[in-house]
Image: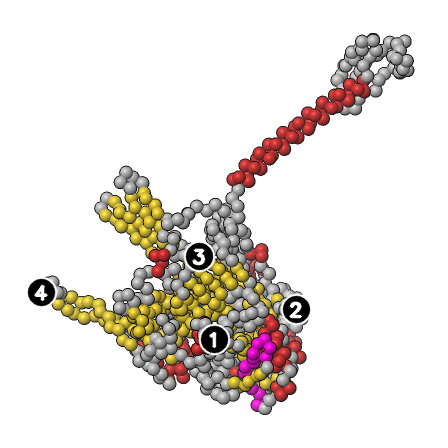
Amino acid sequence: RTRTYGMAPMSAKHNGAHTDTSPEIQPCPGRVPETFTMASSKDGSSSDGPRRCTQLFALKVTAFVSCVLCVLFIAVIIALAVIKLERPTCAPGYSVIPRDLENPRVFDGLTPREYISARDYLLNVKSLNLVPFSQASINSSYIYMIDHLMPLKDTVLTFLQGISKQPERTAKAIIIRGDMTPPRVEEYIVGPLPYPTYHKLVTNPSFTKSRIPYSAKPVDKIEYDVLYSMLYNISVDLYPLMYGSYKLSYHNCTKGVDCLLWWDIAPRGRVSGERKTWFWSFRDVEGFYLHPLGLEIQIDHESTNVKEWKVTKIVYNGQQFYEVDDLVTRYGGVNLLRKINYEPLGAKEYLYSSYNRRGKSEMPDPLQGPKLVEPDGRRYQVDGQHVSYMHWDFDFKMRPSTGLQVFDVRFQEERIAYEISLQDAVVFYSGYGPVQGTSMYFDASWMMGATCNELVPGVDCPETAVFLDADFLTNTQDPWRIQNSVCIFENTGNIPLRRHYTNFPGGYSGYAGLVDYHLIVRTITNIWNYDYIFDYIFHQNGAVQVRVSATGYVQATYALYGERKFGYPIYNDVVANIHQHLFNYKVDLDINGVQNSYATLDVSTHRTEVAWSKGVHKTEMVFEKNIQENELDAGPGQLNNTKPKYDVILNMDATSKFKSERGYRILNHGISKFILQENEATKAANWAKYPLAVTKYHDFEDTSSSIYAQNDPWDPLLDFDKFIQNNDSIVNTDIVAWVTMGLLHIPHTEDVPSTTTAGSQVTFYLLPFNYFTECPSVSSPNTVKITPKREGGINLNTHGTSFESTCVQKSNGPDKYDGRLHDVEL
């Protein structure tokens, strides 16, 4: 289009300035109207076009800036509204103080500095002829483990009473003496820490032998390295069989595609002194425990001369051979043995053992489940390895062999227990094949504490939990750390601790209740196929609950004909065998001091005349208190007591306001009859015969089992029956209760991919029994009381506790997981 512009007369002059005589004026940048006539100035000259364009441009910029400012203003208003509506993150609450590694307390485990000082001291003792673990061989002497040695109980109590200074800290070192004739295991005390000046060879008086047999020692990394080197060479010889039968190999395979795994079982032999280990093979996939291949090898490794180690037996598809060459020759022949012919498994076929999600989802879109929230922050305090919660105070530590222990457990500043700790966890199998028929696991020998693992926030423990680390020096040269291996958290229980609703026809007069808030200290360990969740739980009514939950994979075997009577098939050619779990705990209660007794309240019935109705009779329940005089009465004697009863540890010299002896009841909800007590390989678990045994306290009877139980269970170094057979008096003296819980497990298809904790939990309680004048939870400000108003509505009394949550819990989910073992930095 043609644009027309008004022009000044050609002859006009303006203040002597030159007048532009060009035919048109250049338009200003930007959009210009189609027709625009410029007004003339007073003197007849036209206005300056560019100046007018500048004015238009300024107007446009002003409008644009105004729009931007309006948008920003609206955005700020929206942001302020969102901020006002958004709730803040919940406060952290009570403090968590890191452990003071320079000043360990009396119950604390060893610090990295103490581990290293004890190790270095022993390595410098010329007479011991020790080799550093990294350089050790089967026929050398080396340190296998260093652990904290607890001081004598009387010494600790004197210190806690403020009468004496803290006892010196010492370590117990387990030394393998492979260079001696005969080889053996020795235990040494090293101290004082952290600057040791002495070492002393010791033998526990509770041991049945003065010398610890070499055959009883745990298999360590040094021994495994040689064994797996042998298996590598054996696998090379067996390659034609492995590839022909399974399309797998051990020495020449691609990880995750066509690899075979070897794993060992225990005990290692059939009689005391033997050291013959069965290894069995699996397909290397997720959940390999459910993929046994039917190929098992026994190796004799009793000698400290590895040249004498040899294969003694091989079982392939239920057929036994004594030499590798014989099996290979027969496999290469025609119709000389029954062969296995596995087709390569596709991903869908071996998915059954994995944790991958499968099946129709129960919800269209994944939704988060409920979570714990601490509206006012944590209500417990952690100071190193000391915990305070409500009226509770206690210390904890991790022992490498058995894991979590709690000490000096106090309620309302009174000591309830000196020690509560796991002693051993065993799993006894039955089966037809050589592996399933001999599997008897004593898990303390596999280092339940040192095999604990990092806990996953939001799954293993709530996101609100406090996570703490544990240090060990076991089966290695240097101390190492498992981070986040202990968690502490407060839980609601999702049930009232106590409540009551008072009703009458047509109404009610009141309600009162209290949530069962409690504190849980937890660790989880993995031993071979099973995962065990160990909990110590502290309730507001003065009760302590000890709970074990089992999960993980079942131990499955290749489905030989003879296995069918020992288990159900859980997949094609796979059977999971019947087994029993048993757990033993030491419970050292101190009720108003150490002078305690054990009483049973035995319940019976009798016929009696009704007092208010002559000639009318009824059957009644009555109980009789019986003080058990000695250890045989309290152990074997109670096995024959079929009456319903209460088991109470009491102080006969300390009475309540109402003249009853103060005590604590032991309530075992996990009683499981010891099924295989006649089996020769279970003698190291004689404690399992007694749901409850009570013995006189001796410092040398500090554990009911030992790390040597696994590899010599036939003639155990520590026999719990010896604790009882000396038949000490247990009246008005320091006594210890030994509590055994158990689970019988007949696996089934719903144990695939792994066993669930629902239905696999056992627990026992320590319950106050006439210890208080009333339930101590009445002091809780979380009690809720409701009464009706005459005019309608309610009177609500929450004793100052708000039920409104005004914050958001800080997220701490599985993404924070690391999973690695860490070297300890000094």
Residue at numbered disc 1: 164
Label 4: how many Cα within 10 Å (few below 14, some 14–19, many 20+) = few
Q: Amino acid at mark 2?
A: Cys
Q: How far apart are labels 3 and 2 at the CA level? A: 48 Å
**Which mark's residue is nearer the viewer, 3 or 1?**
1
Question: Is 303 placed above or below 377 here?
Answer: below
The residue located at (55%, 72%) in the rendering is 110
- Measured as percent of width and height from the top left, residue 498 is found at 33, 56
Picture quarter containing residue 38? top right
Question: Does residue 187 belong to the magenta stretch?
Answer: yes
Picture quarter containing residue 332? bottom right
Quadrant (top left/top right/bottom left/bottom right) for the N terminus: top right
Residue at numbered disc 3: 491
The residue located at (60%, 66%) in the rendering is 821
The residue located at (56%, 80%) in the rendering is 190
Q: Amino acid at mark 3?
A: Asn
Residue at numbered disc 4: 614
- Main SS of the magenta part reads strand
